[in-house]
Amino acid sequence: MRDTKALVESSLLVALSVVLFLASHFLPVVGVLLSLFCPVPLVILGLKVPLKNAFMGTFVAFVLVTLFMGVLGGVLFVFGFALMGVMLGFFGHRFDKVSEILFYGFLVSLFSKLILMALVKLITGVNPFAIDPKAIMEAFNEAEALFSGSSKAFFETMRMQVEAMSKVMVYILPAILIAASFLDCVISYLISQKVAGRFKITSLPKVPPFGEWRFPKSTLFAFFIAFVLSFFDHSGNNIGVLYMLALNLKVISIMIFMVQGMATVWYILSKVSKQKIKPWVGVVVVAAVMFIPVLSVAVIMLGFADILIDLRAKIGR
């Protein structure tokens, strides 16, 4: 009886993951939101059943998706989020610390995306790592045409930033891939935790409040190494391996400082207000930091200082 119940639950979770994936690809606007929920059924599957059974369920889902969307669709399903979802559930069952779950989940997410890109190139012949700066500028010009009534000075500033970024983006793809893998893992875990808790299906270790998020001091060493390496292997427009490594380390370090800085801001706000911060406040803070350059720099410096001397511990005294 128990085996039958487990089989039915597993079948429903597999079917739900397939439906969500198909809906995320075929529904125009809602599909973007649904794509965030795609890993959830498989995270729960990885939590509730042995890993072998979870992989069998994933294979069945792969076959179903392939029937509707072809081999490329099946590959996108498995390596886009299914493998990460199942392993997040497995790690959630095995480990008690959220940091361990997210660390190993991030590694699986990164590994899956690397395999996905290799398979996409093999199947389609298109290199996902190939970025054309001209195509990016053409897309920006089209976006500028849609908002032609807006401030010209604003768009000129944006044009300069986008043009500079499009030239560098080719070299910082590894950093972008690492950041995307981490973000994908964290978002999938947070949504899975909320859904599982809301419907009382199972439980995942709770993520600490954002104001308590911290990165290790070793991040500072990565930034220092990036600073030193940036003086080597770079001549004019020719970028060598060492300089490319420095560039990626610097980008990753700055992203970490920004997250640490926003966590520090969140901590300060919660201390000042003496109550739990509303989610909309977080959205406003993140939007302001992302779109106002002065605030971005200030938050990055705040994050660096917090890692270096633990500002939050001093503020909390």
Image: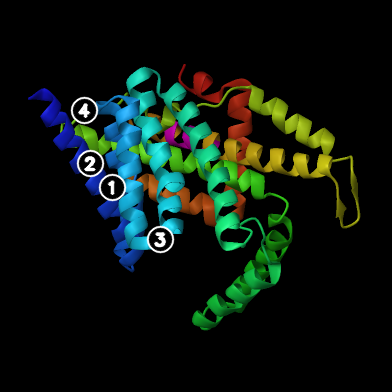
Label 4 belongs to which residue? 202
**Do tag 2 and tag 1 residues touch (Cβ < 8 Å)?**
yes
Name the front one of labels 2 and 4: 2
Mark 3 → mark 1, Cα distance in angstroms: 17 Å
Label 2 belongs to which residue? 13
Q: Nearer the viewer, residue 197 or 201?
A: 201
Label 3 belongs to which residue? 70
Q: Position of residue 226 (x, y in %)?
A: 76, 35
Badge 4 marks a residue whose secondary structure is loop
Query: What range is drawn magenta here?
Result: 261-267
Q: Position of residue 268 (x, y in %)?
A: 45, 32
Mark 2 → mark 4, Cα distance in angstroms: 13 Å
For marks 2 and 4 on the same chain, the one whose residue lies earlier in the sequence: 2
Q: Residue at x 47, y 16 (%)?
A: 317
- Residue 87 position (above or below residue 36): above
Query: Image quarter for residue 131?
Result: bottom right
